[in-house]
Amino acid sequence: MDIPLKVKVSKQLQSISGFKLVRFQDKFLYNPDLHWYVLIRVPQEPCFLVVIITSEIDKRIAYYRNTKKQKAVQCLIKIDNNIFPFLTKPCVIECNKTEYLKIEEIIHKIDEEKGFTFRNESVPTYLRQEIVSAIIYSPLISRFIGNKARSANPV
C-alpha cells in the first residue's frame, strides 16, 4: 500500500530546519507549471516562509518598474545553474512574494498529480543572507513576514 503524498510531504516538511529547495505545482497559481521554491523554516513554529523561484526575470523587472515599485527590483535575487546545477535557465528568487504558511497550507497548495520534489543541494550561506535581507527590505512584504525572516537567522 502506497503512503499518500500528503503524508509523505508532511513528514518531510516537519523534518526541515533552515533552508530547503522544493518543487511543486501550486494548484492556485495562475501559471500551471511546476515551480521551484525556497522554504525557510520559521524557528519554534510549524511554519515556513515560502519564496518562489521564477524564470520570468524581464517580466518581473518590467512589472515593478511600470508600477513604480523600483525598490522591489532590488529584492529579486538572480540565480543560475552555477549556483544550482538543476536549473535549466537563469531565474530570480522573487522575495517580494514571500508567503508565511503552515505545513498544512503548503500541503493544500500542492497539485498531487504533479508531485513534490525535495533537493539535497544546500543553499549557500551568502545566498541565505541575501534572501533574508531581500525579504526584510522588500517594500511589498509585511513587517510580520520581515520579522519572521529575521528570526530565521541564515548563518
Image (spheres, grey):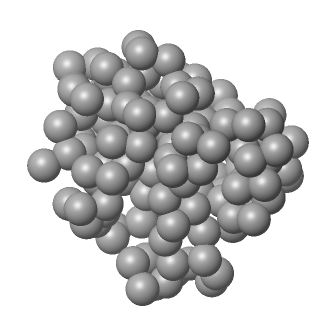
Residue in the foreground of this view, choosing between 151 and 77: 77
Q: What is the x, y in percent for residue 112?
A: 71, 45
Picture quarter containing residue 39? Answer: top left
Res 84 → quadrant: bottom left
Quadrant of the rendered structure where residue 118 is?
bottom left
Res 19 visible: yes
Residue ID at (33%, 42%): 133
Where is residue 153 shown, x and y percent of the image? Answer: 17, 37
The image shows residue 60, relative to residue 151, as above or below, that is below
Question: Which residue corresponds to the image point at 73% horizontal and 37% vertical from the top-left?
Answer: 68
83 vs 33, left or right, is: left
Q: Nearer the viewer, residue 70 or 19?
A: 70
Please state if 63 lies on the left or on the right of 84 as rendered: right
Q: Nearer the viewer, residue 126 or 9?
A: 126
Q: Visible in this render: residue 10?
A: no
Residue found 45% across the figure and 50% down from its top = 38
**Looking at the image, which residue sits at the far left?**
155
| Image point (54%, 29%), residue name | 139
**Number of labelled discs?**
0
